[in-house]
Image: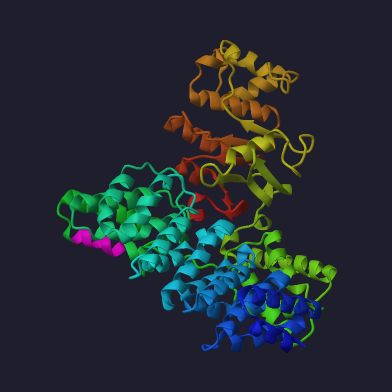
Amino acid sequence: MSAPLIDAIVKAENTEQRQAAADALAAFAKSEGLVKSVAIIESLNPLLENKKSVPHREGALLALGSLATVFGQAAEPFLIPQMPKVFELYSDKMVPVRQAAEVASKAIMGLPTRYAVRLLLPVIFHAIKESKWQSKIGAMDILSGLTFTAPQQIAAALSDIVPVVSEAMWDSKPEVRTQATKTTTDCFNVVGNPDLTSSIPYLVGCINRPEEAAECIHQLAATTFVTTVEEPTLAIMCPLLVRGLAERTPSIQRQTAVIIDNMCKLVENPAHAQQFLPKLLPGLDRMIEIGASPELRGVAERARATLVRVGGGEPGSKDQVVTIAYSVSSTQVLEVLKTKATFVKEDSFSSAVLAYVSTLCAELIASRNFEKDAWVSSISPYLTTLGSDAEVAAFADEFNAYWVDYDAKNALSNAAVADVEEGELLCDCEFSLAYGGMILLNKTRLNLRRGQRYGLCGPNGVGKSTLMRAIAEGQLEGFPSPDELRTVFVEHNLQAEDADLPVLTFIFNDEKIKNLEKKAVVDMLESVGFDKEKQEQAVGSLSGGWKMKLELARAMLMNADILLLDEPTNHLDVANVAWLQNYLTSLTNVTSMIVSHDSGFLDAVCTGIIHYETRKLKKYKGNLSKFVE
């Protein structure tokens, strides 16, 4: 039935009629259903490969575009494999074919969800590296489009993208160089590191104009880096840093080493830095060996030490911490998928769909993305051709839950979980947390046990203080009410009107304490060091250490189950920090949650670390040093 419609496409007199015939073929295919239409897609291959007939090649491309439009995402498993041929025809000698290739390419590559970026990149890379110049431009144009529809996924893949696109900036064709510059700029702009925003044009420019590298390095050396440095930032900086280390001018070498040192101090995840060690260490080692001055060699040594430290240790040494998380192949995912998708029949069409879905899901697992929305969008559009909406929806939930549980059992990131901790379970709640319009935590779980001391860790701006404030003010969904669990935010909240009050009077002014017996209050104050003379002293005259002791005494008088401490060692001298450490560790029946930049304090106090990871809270057993390990 489809043969006459394909003949009509080929025999059409012009592009307009050919498009109409292609649309008619797509409408017929839609009425037949995708299962039967796979044969139609396959029948277009000889037309695409017909070197002698423009109508055949143009018609097949227009038909692919129309089929993509009518079937949508469901047809991806059968249309994406056609992309190498489509990209090849971007370089056809005939203009109508090149234009049809662009139409088909944008229709097909516009189908996949943003979570499929890793699947599309090999096809795009092949076109950029192996095809003729028009195909290279077309592939890079598609890549530029992905930076707007899937910016986070492109950012995560920059370490693979940058080398390929950078090479195209040296192409012999000026048109390719122009497109490569645009695509590189688009890719760099997804990084989102505010420290580098103004430098992106220079970072792009110095790739194909090496003479500008020195000026770019000079500008970056004067930049104060304050934002956490992650893999995308390192990916776009690495080409410049490698070039800077290879410069002969000592001042440029020195500035490059300073940039490496400053940036690496802000790297929190060793896995982000580890892959760049082989690229940057040779240049630093060369500087250390033959640097023009002792000062230059010293700068290089410091940069090298920082880079090695944040990258998990000396490459190849027995002490190196190799950050390899568990891996799951698409074949493994496919086996589980076949077991659980009991409504799917065994045939060639189903096998192709399941293989495609398993590849998508394997990519989600590799990126540790277990968000329900991501899994539904990577399953439902494809399996609806194999089962009812209800069956597919139930399966998507079950399949997602299976891999969430698998991750919890196997991921290195779950090195310690609440279940192995000692102490009464005080809370176990799932919640989301936002500040303004920004989501800080999304459907994460928090469980706390009595007597444990948790360090709350993560980059600046992720919402550590916001989380503690929400707990203290009873605004955290699912967290026990104040009647069940007494939580106190320990802070320096002394008001100006209270400054002249004696300590004892100040304590009794608190609504939650004023009805207590005086002896109980005095005993508590004495337990933290307030003798009779100190109790009569004005609170405004107390040092930072004594104010902290006062706040802790007040919290304990409220019978706190959980203490929330935000930077408790600020303004404390060494002696008072030591006192605070001893006091907190002595509270065997009270739980503490602590935010602090004092790593020594967290090392001495914490029994566990709660870490922010991609809008989730992950718990690790042990102190800060154990967490770093």
In the displayed structure image, the side of residue 211 where residue 45 appears, left or right: right
Residue 475: where, in percent of width, then height? 72, 37
Q: Quick one: 137 or 390, which is closer to the camera?
A: 137
Q: Name the residue at the front extreme.
A: 13
Residue 577: where, in percent of width, then height? 47, 34
Residue 449: where, in percent of width, then height? 68, 47
Residue at x 76% of width, y 19% of height: 515
Count of labels shown?
0
User: Does 201 appear in magenta?
Assistant: no
Residue at x 25% of width, y 62% of height: 285
In the displayed structure image, the side of residue 175 where residue 413 appears, left or right: right
In the figure, 171 relative to 553: above or below? below
Which quadrant does the N terminus fall into?
Answer: bottom right
In the figure, 366 relative to 463: above or below? below
Asked whether the viewer can see residue 376, the reply is: yes
Asked whether the viewer can see residue 326, the reply is: no
Residue 323: where, in percent of width, then height? 48, 65
Q: Quadrant of residue 71?
A: bottom right
Q: Quick one: 420 or 393, which is closer to the camera?
A: 393
Q: Quadrant of residue 30?
A: bottom right
User: Does 288 appear in magenta?
Assistant: yes
The part of the chain drawn in magenta is 281-289
- SS majority, magenta: helix
Q: Quick one: 559 or 25, which is closer to the camera?
A: 25
Residue at x 50% of width, y 64% of height: 141
In the figure, 556 relative to 340: above or below? above
In the figure, 359 relative to 286: above or below? below
Color scheme of the displayed model: rainbow
Q: Name the residue at the top extreme.
A: 500
Residue at x 45% of width, y 61% of height: 183
